[in-house]
Image (cartoon, rainbow, N blue to C red):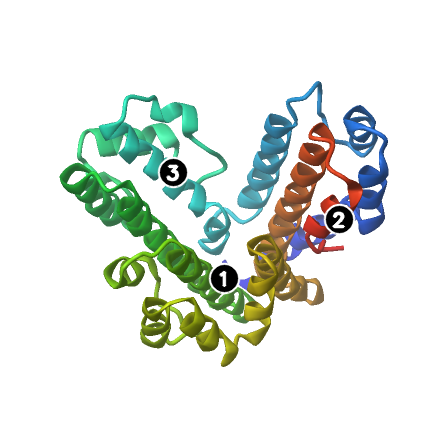
Amino acid sequence: MKKNDYLFAVASVRALENALLKQSDLEQLINAEDYNRAVSILTEKGYEISSTDYSSALDNELEKTWEYVSKAAPESEALKAFVVKNDFQNLKAILKAEVMSYNAEDYFVKPCVIEPEKLFKAVSERKFDELPSFIGEAAKNALDLMTTTGNGQLCDAVADTAALCAISAFLKAENDELLCEYADTFVAVTDIKTAYRAVKTGKNRAFIERSLAPCNKLNLTDMVNAADSGMEDFCEFLSSGFSDYRAELEKSPSAFEKYCDDKLLQIIKKAKMTAFGVSPLAAYFVAKETEIKCLRIILSGKLSFVSGEIIRERMRELYV
């Protein structure tokens, strides 16, 4: 499809953006006296949430959003980038079920690119060639690792790296400058998170190398060398070009996660300035996903009687 072909879909998204929650709405929810009042406020704003099962309701809301944007741009590969992580999450559940006694289907998540049942059938029957190329080879390699080594963490690393490569490839398939910038930043921050966790848990060099995806914004060789040398050298590596990320990491892992999410949202917000192409549709999905992430934090906090101050610290930047 040409960029002009999305004009009607983009106009529809602009109308939907008016219903997105604003910072004042989140503040109202945080200030609600209890969970039930917060749910009541959300109901007034169009959410359908009952009892304490807010998670399923929010899952359904995100699925509806995905159904809308994917139908608006059915030929867009780029949009798949925003849900394909769930395909690899489903893959990891299937692979672990191969060596552990649990039902993988209980752990399937949506929205995703491939129907989980189709993925399950292909892996179970070892028909990897029936899967799309972005996941078929990764599924085979990860299964070989799982069955030969029983190393679940290494299996996860292979799947996670393949997921990053798929996300980057989907985003760049559209040849959209904004989505390419988003892809490079997403892979970079994810690689930094992965390397940080590897240093914290004492993973060896081979594991670190296998856990990182190719990235235009990072010198992976230098980062692996730094991570393999320990936390001090890793932080020193970040000081050259990623000092802001280092500062957030030194505050806390949760502060770093929030900072990365906000960075990505700031990039996708640039889609507000265009009426062409698929990026406004992608931006709307990210906006809704971010909104739902904030609602999970708030509602979980209300159920656990977490203070408003702590909840505010965890809030992500919103699209509107």
Q: Residue 203, how many percent across, how many down?
A: 31, 56
Q: Amino acid at mark 1?
A: Phe
Q: Amino acid at mark 2?
A: Arg
Secondary structure under tag 1 reads: helix
Q: Amino acid at mark 3?
A: Ile
Residue matched to label 3: 114
229 on left or right of 142: right
User: In the rendered view, would you say 265 is above or below 107?
Assistant: below
Residue matched to label 1: 186
259 on left or right of 159: right
Upstream in sequence: badge 3 or badge 2: 3
Marks 3 and 2 sit apart, C-alpha to C-alpha, by: 36 Å
Which mark, by number, is residue 247?
Answer: none
Upstream in sequence: badge 3 or badge 1: 3
Secondary structure under tag 3 reads: loop
User: In the rendered view, would you say 92 is above or below 9?
Assistant: above
How many other residues sit within 10 Å of disc 2, few (<14), some (14-19) or many (≥20)?
Answer: some
Secondary structure under tag 2 reads: helix
Check contact, mark 1 vs mark 2: CB within 8 A.
Answer: no
